[in-house]
Amino acid sequence: MRLSPTSPIPPTRRTAARRITTAALAAGAALGLAATSVGTAHAADSADRGRPGTRIIGGTEQPDGKHPFMAALLQKGTGNPHDRQFCGGSLLEPGIVMTAAHCVEGTKPKEIETVVGRTVLSNKNQGELRNVAEIVVHPRYAKGEGAYDLALLMLEEPVEGVAPVNLPTAGTDALIRPGAKATVIGWGNTNTEVTNYPDRLRAVDVPIVSHIECKASYPQYDSKVNMCAGVEGKDSCQGDSGGPIFRKLQGRKGVFQVGITSYGDGCAAQGAPGVYTYTGSAKLWDTLEESAAGKRALNKLAG
Ligand code: ARG
């Protein structure tokens, strides 16, 4: 309801929200969902009404510098970065930010910029701002289908002094055991009832959901390249797309990013966990080389 194109949200933010809306609606349509993440009144709305505990969508504000690898995707412009933010991302390599394909599909590098290591969007002193030289969208990503929702932003200049995220060993599932706790972060909507985009980064811990359960919620769910997480009241939401869901491992510095925020039916509703691009999927990375740009990006990753 609130993110529909007619919603009275600020003009700059509206542009971003529209982009998200279109992608999410397309994804929902392909999934055969009547009302999607941004659709009309849906389960999450009515379920959350008047229940303060379930807003945010269950998360908390994060202190400055806690997630240095976190990236914000901004539309280029002179306005407040808080109004220009439209998706999240993560630093995969000093020169590469990983995000969701639906965030940047059809976008030219010149139209966006990315800032790594910023916690408060409006604070221009935080983080490292970079231009994007090239946008590599996964060749198997098809608008509206939900799978292969991965894109790599090749930066004009590398980000120095920030440890990139780790990825799970390709082709394994040790880090997505159902019930295990993962953390998802972003500047996305915090309230399914009254839309609110926070300036400060937020995080919420969510349980990983099994493939079979996720498939019950989303018939088009592709367990080869996706994973699911979330529980009623705790989820990512619009504006979090492209950002990371990750786990901390004992005795290991840094984090392991297991997924990229992709889609969901509403936010934080019972029986509708968030769906993420699974970054430990061998198929996801192997098929990236089906395009020349993807192949070049892979070579850069390997080298
Ligand atoms: N597609 C949304 C975006 O562009 C993310 C939706 C995530 N939804 C969820 N229920 N986890 O920001």
Image (cartoon, rainbow, N blue to C red):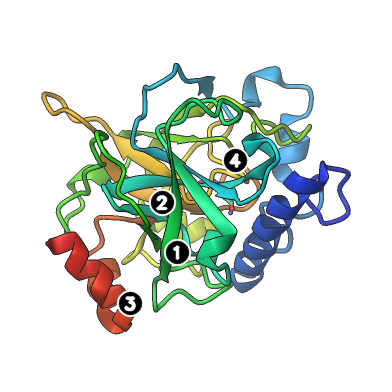
What residue sits right under mark 1 in the picture? 149
The amino acid beneath tag 3 is Ala
58 on left or right of 100: right
Alpha carbon distance from label 4 to label 1: 24 Å
- Vertical comparison of 159 with 196: above or below: below
Q: Earlier in the sequence, mark 2 or mark 4?
A: 2
Residue topped by disc 3: 293
Taking depth in this image into account, of 110 and 220 the one nearest to the observer is 110
Residue 289 as seen in the image, left or right of residue 125: left
Q: Nearer the viewer, mark 1 or mark 3?
A: 3
> Which residue type does callout 1 highlight?
Asp
Q: Which residue is mark 2?
A: 260
User: Would you say the beta carbon of the disc 3 residue lies within 8 angstroms of ligand 1?
Assistant: no
How many C-alpha atoms fall within 10 Å of the one at disc 3: few (<14), some, or many (≥20)?
Answer: some
Number of numbered markers: 4
Cα distance between the residues tagged 3 and 2:
20 Å
Quarter placement of the C terminus: bottom left
Label 1 element class? loop
Q: Residue at x 67, y 59 (%)?
A: 19
The disc labelled 4 sits on which kind of residue? Gln
Label 4, secondary structure: give it: loop
Question: In terms of sequence position, does the residue under pointer 1 or pointer 3 come before the other?
Answer: 1
Where does the image place residue 169, in percent across and percent down from the top left? 14, 53
Badge 2 amino acid = Ile
Q: CA distance from mark 2 to mark 4?
A: 21 Å
Asked if the residues shown at circle 4 and circle 1 are in contact, with their CB atoms under 8 angstroms apart, the answer is no
